[in-house]
Amino acid sequence: MANGKVIKVAQGNSVWIKDYYFLSLQRLEEWPDKLDLPSGFFGLMLCMDAGKTDRDHIFSAAAKALENGLCCFSAWGPGCEFTHDVFDQAILKKRPDPEERDEKIILTTWHADESLDEALHDFALLAVPADFFQRRLNDWLIVSVGNKDWDAKIQHRLSDLKKLNDDVLGQEKQ
């Protein structure tokens, strides 16, 4: 497992050009000041139970993510709507100018009614950043907080994106 250290778990290919990274934290307060991601911009999927985390810790993580090049955000797990809203607040604080926000809009989503597989599929295979970031973004980071079962599942599912895609699309057909 990747406790406190960002690890690359999947390399892009001709179908999925994204590179995927994983970070496991015991608590959100462990969020690193600096993320070692190569492209300078990144998409983030945060998997956590917001009911176990203070709003200020979520806001602090969001601020650090923005400083490190966050340009696309997805929240999953119990209370993910709240996590999403706090990230939106951090974005507005960092970018109070509406014109700058429009040009470099940071797309944010939450997946309250989806399984981890469905949310991961959406983030890893379907999410697209705003136009400004499309040629600049290649790094997609999934962070799991305080749940070893999620850690294992995320790393396993990212190791075979075709199977993740087939499994999720197969579920939708049923």
Image (cartoon, rainbow, N blue to C red):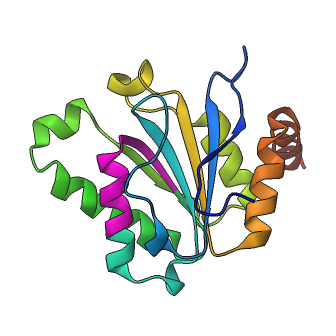
Residue at the top extreme, as displayed:
14
The residue depicted at 38 percent of the width and 52 percent of the height is: 65
Residue 82: percent from left, percent from top: 42, 73
Q: Which residues are magenta?
A: 60-74
Viewed as shown, does residue 156 lie left or right of 35?
right
Residue 134: percent from left, percent from top: 43, 23
The residue depicted at 38 percent of the width and 26 percent of the height is: 133
Tell me, yes or no, whether the highlighted magenta stretch contains residue 67: yes
The residue depicted at 68 percent of the width and 49 percent of the height is: 120
Say above or below: 123 vs 63: above
Tell me, yes or no, whether the highlighted magenta stretch contains residue 51: no
Viewed as shown, does residue 155 lie left or right of 93?
right
Q: Quadrant of the N terminus?
A: bottom right
Quadrant in which residue 76 is drawn: bottom right
Depth order, front residue of 106/61: 61
The residue depicted at 32 percent of the width and 69 percent of the height is: 59
Residue 21: percent from left, percent from top: 62, 43
Say above or below: 11 vs 146: above
Across the whole image, how many numbered discs are drawn on residues? 0
Depth order, front residue of 52/106: 52
Depth order, front residue of 42/113: 42
